[in-house]
Amino acid sequence: MIAEPGTRILKADQDAIEAGSRSLSAGGLVAFPTETVYGLGADAGNGAAVARLYAAKGRPSFNPLIAHVADTGSACRIGIFTPAAEKLAAAFWPGPLTLVVAKRPDADIADLALAGLDTVGLRVPEHPVAHELLKAFKGAVVAPSANRSGHVSPTSATHVLADLRGRIDLIIDAGPCAVGVESTIVSCVDHPTLLRPGGIPRDAIERVLGSPLTTASAIDDAPVAPGMLMSHYAPRAALRLDADTAQTGEALLAFGHAPPFSGTALNLSPRGDLIEAAANLFSHLRALDASGARHIAVMKVPHEGLGEAINDRLKRAAAPRRL
Ligand code: TXA
Ligand code: MG
């Protein structure tokens, strides 16, 4: 009988990066930090490893995965870059931007990882540990956020462990993620289209393109990016958005100057800073869930800069559950 393998946790250093790279080569599942959220990595070319990854997350297999690579050159060997894609890669890579482009027919990406699409989401992360891991591994690493499907994304190794202990091989721990919301996804297959707001604000992208992005409509059950499923980012508690304050029986997720409140309360950013708020979003939602709150009142977050991504995740977290 084979003993149930445990999940190793290693502090991010050279040994951890080498262990991560070896594990990926052997078909293992490795959670690693990026500047946005922790990713759960598998060798993109290894269909069996990708199948284990879907199983570990409990993720619907129609959801395609982002391929992570160390540099733009590696990305261009996997996807066909349009002039717009080239511009965006030059401006924002490495960084929290995923570009969807046509896949080269000979690219070594398992069909399962792309859920049958002939396009591929590519990302060059900026986090030094992600970068070193991708460099050491050499190939592409597909990595969704390292949470159970439907949970909020993990921004610390503790979050990853809470969701995936015993289901994955290794977690590389480099502390909390700086950006805190997932990458912005722009499809460049056709006219550049915003598929998911994220770590790079829309206006920064539009400035580089010199024209507005088309916005994909969030269709509940026919998602362009399945991360757009309406109830995708769900804490256990029910959320009430745009609240002025919390009522009895609710916990408060505040932003900026908060009204006095005697119950459980956390503030995304007391000084009203959207960058700080994004970095705190998922850990605060997890902490309020862990406090046993059944209802969370969420104060209004301005819809500018990173506020678009924050409000997108909050809206999904508040949507009716489909389970
Ligand atoms: O910040 C991030 O993007 C994190 C870190 C780990 O890199 N990753 C992440 O992956 O958020 P995931 O799998 O949780 O979300 C990826 C989203 C999904 O909604 C998926 O449907 C969409 O990207 N996606 C991936 N490939 C696509 C493609 N070819 N066309 C359209 N959407 C795609
Ligand atoms: Mg995710």
Image: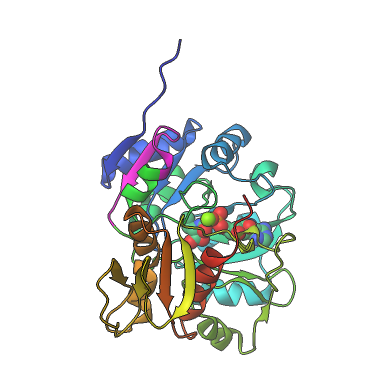
Task: Report x, y in % for residue 207.
Answer: 55, 88
Q: Residue furthest top?
A: 1
Residue 285 found in image quarter: bottom left
Highlighted magenta segment, given as a residue range: 163-175
Q: Does residue 247 lie above or below 108 as drawn?
A: below
Color encoding of the figure: rainbow
User: From this viewpoint, is residue 26 visible?
Assistant: yes
Q: Specify whether 69 is left or right of 222.
A: left
Ligand 1 located in image quadrant: bottom right
User: From this viewpoint, is residue 121 visible?
Assistant: no
Q: Reply yes or no: does residue 173 show up in magenta.
A: yes
Q: Does residue 310 lie above or below 13 as drawn?
A: below
Task: Report x, y in % for residue 318.
Answer: 53, 66
Which is nearer the eye, 312 or 319? 319
Q: Residue furthest front?
A: 248
Q: Does residue 4 lie above or below 63 as drawn?
A: above
The residue drawn where x is 42% and y is 74% is: 298
The residue drawn where x is 35% and y is 60% is: 288
Task: Report x, y in % for residue 294.
Answer: 42, 58
Which is nearer the eye, 29 or 266? 266
Q: Reply yes or no: does residue 68 show up in magenta.
A: no
Task: Report x, y in % for residue 228.
Answer: 63, 64
